[in-house]
Amino acid sequence: MPMDKLRATPVDKILSFRRNPDLQQQRRQQTDEMEDIPRFLPPQLLFDDADGKDTHRRMADTDSINSEDAVRLPPPRRSPVSMRNLQRQLYSPNQCMNVLKAIVAVVTICVLFTTIPLYRRQRIEKENSLKMVLLWNEQLPTGGSAHMECGCLVSTRRNHDDKPFDAVVFNADYPYTFEDLNNIKRTPDYYAVFAAKKPLSLAQNPLAGSMLPLFNLTMTYRLDSQLIWTDYYFSHTNLARRLNWFRSPSKNLVDDMPDSMFQHLDSEVLKKTRLAVYLTYEVDQNSLPGGLYLQKLQKYADIDAHDSCLGSQDCSHYHFMLIFETSACPDYVPPQMYMAMDKLMVPVLIGGGNLTNLVPQQSYIRGLDFSTPKDLVRHLKDLVNDREEYKRFFWWHSIYKLRQTYQPYCALCSLIQKPAEERQIGQGSSKLAFIKWWTSAEYQCPNRSTTFL
């Protein structure tokens, strides 16, 4: 039959086929291995005649459907099999997990949008309530311009966030002036801190000016300072509190030291192969007496020199460290003393002052106890040969611990955090109290020429 003779199938009939398919045709086409035939297909689209006439008829009928009727066709309905597959997919573990992840993501975003403004507000309030410490003439040991320490903000910027400072630290180990101090914002009860770790005999005289000093708080190595300021300190092994006195050692080293610690000490002593070392220093008029004494020592023993005992320049294979201290200021302990003790070396102090109650007894050797450098070298060599006697210098390790001060301004921060009426500091905080402290005859440094050697 020619294609132009085919009759177009009415649209209502196509819709009738889609909504009411022939059940008998579905059963004839259905087998045990096949899924259910979708019910929305018309029978004309399921079967072909042998001669292909029905195919041509369907093609003609399809071409006869105009575009307007095709747009009005409703979407096909899902078959039962498709519906079951969709439900199986919707309720699968993977789908549930994806939904749960989406819910968690939404909740997280909501929480972030809620907490970020709150966190910013709390941070601003905390910064506004922080106590401020200004380092007037030194750099921070950690680098940078500011850092947190014990709840305070320690800064080297004189206009940090335009906030008033609660304490201004003048480090007497370096040159300083009071110029521009009046331009710095300060609280009404702020502290002008006089700080020093080096011997005060080397510091500039704070009373040399024409006006009274501004200092109302002292923070130095001196034990009569209102705050004691050192890089190291001794404490008990189980309590990090600074000690002001030490007990005498026992006659037998084993009585003070457990077996495990004694074995460790013995193994460390066996590693030592060299006699003595000293740290290089700047040669000037003050260090000249020490240099002359060192030349005499080198006549009787090989003594090495190091720039440092840190990192690759470890000095633990030396038995002794020679420490030349030109000053004899009360309460001052040379920092090399602590370094030697930390590296399990016996310090040999040549010069210096009285270290009673500053370091444990019988933990170091005094050069002043020997009449000549030759006698000192002979004593050091005898100790190397007598290992048991040498190890007695480390008796204090079982009772005391040498600790390093990692937060040097923590004591100052703790003080200014207290209310003004609760701050208990000795000698008061007036300018006259500082003058009395500086001129105290008990803590004046003796003349170097009469105390060295």
Image (cartoon, rainbow, N blue to C red):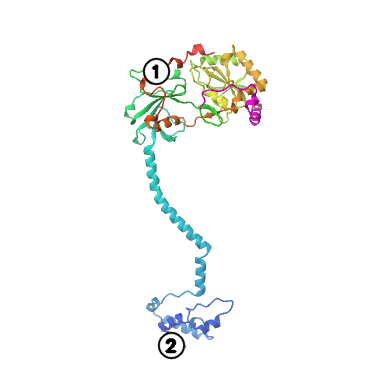
Residue shown at 48%/59% (left/top)? 100
Report the front residue among 314 and 165.
Answer: 165
Mark 1 or mark 2: which comes first in sequence?
Answer: 2
The amino acid at mark 2 is Lys
Q: How many marks?
A: 2
Q: Which residue is mark 1?
A: 436
* Position of residue 148 in the picture relative to residue 363 (left or right): left
Q: Residues within 10 Å of mark 2 (few under 14, many from 20)?
A: few
- The image shows residue 238, relative to residue 356, as above or below, that is below
Residue 158 in view of the camera = no
Inspect the magenta stretch and tell me whether residue 423 lies in it.
no
Inspect the magenta stretch and tell me whether residue 252 lies in it.
yes
Q: Which residue is mark 2?
A: 5
Please tell me whether mark 1 sits on a helix, a strand or a loop. helix
Please tell me whether mark 2 sits on a helix, a strand or a loop. helix
The amino acid at mark 1 is Lys
Camera-near label (1 vs 2) is 1
